[in-house]
Image: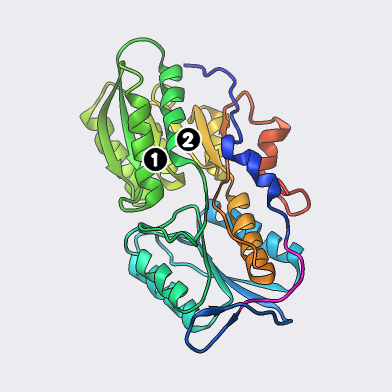
Amino acid sequence: MAINTRIRSGLAALAALSALTAGACGGVEVRDDSGEGEAGTVDGPLELAVVPKAVGHEFWSTVRAGAECAAELAGDVTVNWDGVSAETDVEGQVNLIQNFVTQDVDGIVYAATDSAALAPATQSALDAGVPVAMIDSGTDPQPDEVPLYATDNRAGAVEAANLLAEALGEGEHDVALIEFQPGSQTNTERVEGFTEGLAQHAGLNLVGQQPSHSDVNEARRVTEDILTANPDLAGIFAANEPSVLGAAQAVEAAGRTGEVVIIGWDAAPDEIAGLRNGQIAALVVQNPFRMGFFGVQNMVEHLQEGAPMESADTGVTFVTPENIDSPEVQAVLEPSCDNPPVDQ
């Protein structure tokens, strides 16, 4: 079940990211009392709200590091980092965005927990003259003036299916999908991408699909149920950090570590440990540092210089036991503001 050494980092759009440079000092947009944006410049600091889907997960901590790095490099920029405690608290995130609009922050950078439910919150901010940039997950509809800095989730999930097929080899194999938060744009795209990838491998049979609601314990429970119902299960694709960790725990508890191939998403320390000890065969690793960095960097340039904000693919790296210690992979796994994994 060994996987050939692979590293496919930087999907096609990454080549364009070199044009995104750190903001220079200048004026900020002035909003009049009607809430309509009005061109103008003033001297002074910027205050930005940066809101993850939820606080507490390693992925979002890395997003925060990227956002604060961009603010530090720009100078005189304050990042107000706040989020709900669980990705299922959609109403809580709506209220949080509305509160930041009321506080009259200069800009909002956030990841939507639910693509439909957060669309009105985005529009409300825009109507109040507060520019918005999305990271990781956008809304439906997504306003033309609101950029999205995110992974190509479909392409990454297609490759997850390819990696699973490669690890399992020839023949018929039962596999399962542990998704995370139905209604989230990223969840939808990863499910669709993995399904598309499975269609390219006639020997892979999807016998179970359950959401973890981004909770490790829930992921373990649903994986245990799938394992019980499908004793011949050979592979699992777990589509985010909590899903991966819960699935790995369930497989270990069943005494089937190394027998059931797990392809995971994200790169929390426990996931990296699982990759090294054989619990996990490969990881689809995003660049959360880059998401936070470009979200803040481009918002600052927009406010100070009037530069348009354009969406960008923030890239993905496929990490295996064979390439994990390469400099390219380590730059993504261990980012720092001294040497950020971004193209400037």
Q: Which secondary structure is most common in the magenta stretch?
A: loop
> Which three-letter amino acid code belongs to the residue tagged 2?
Gly
> Do the residues under discs 2 and 1 have CB atoms within 8 angstroms?
yes
> What is the x, y in percent for residue 256?
38, 26
Q: Which residue sits at x=43%, y=65%?
A: 85
Q: Is residue 235 visible?
A: no
Q: Is 212 left, or right, of 85 in this rendering?
A: left
Q: Is residue 341 magenta?
A: no
Asked which quadrant contains residue 206, the reply is top left
Name the one closer to the observer, 299 or 340. Answer: 299
Is 290 displayed left or right of 161 in the figure? right
Report the front residue among 40 and 109.
Answer: 40
Q: Residue at x 52, y 83 (%)?
A: 103
The amino acid at mark 1 is Arg
Q: Which residue is mark 1?
A: 190
Label 1 Cα crowd, 10 Å radius (few <14 / some 14-19 / many 20+): many
Q: Quadrant of residue 13?
A: top right
Disc 1 is placed on an element classified as helix
Residue 340 visible here? yes
Mark number displayed over residue 123: none
Badge 2: residue crowd in 10 Å (few <14, some 14–19, many ≥20) = many
> Going 41% across and 48% down the picture, which residue do you hit?
186
SS for dot 2: helix
Q: Earlier in the sequence, mark 2 or mark 1?
A: 2
- Closer-to-camera residue (343/167): 343
User: Separation of disc 2 and disc 1 at Cα?
Assistant: 8 Å
Color encoding of the figure: rainbow
x and y, in percent, of residue 247 in the image:
38, 38
Relative to 78, does residue 340 appear above or below in the rendering? Answer: above
Where is mark 2, residue-wise? 156
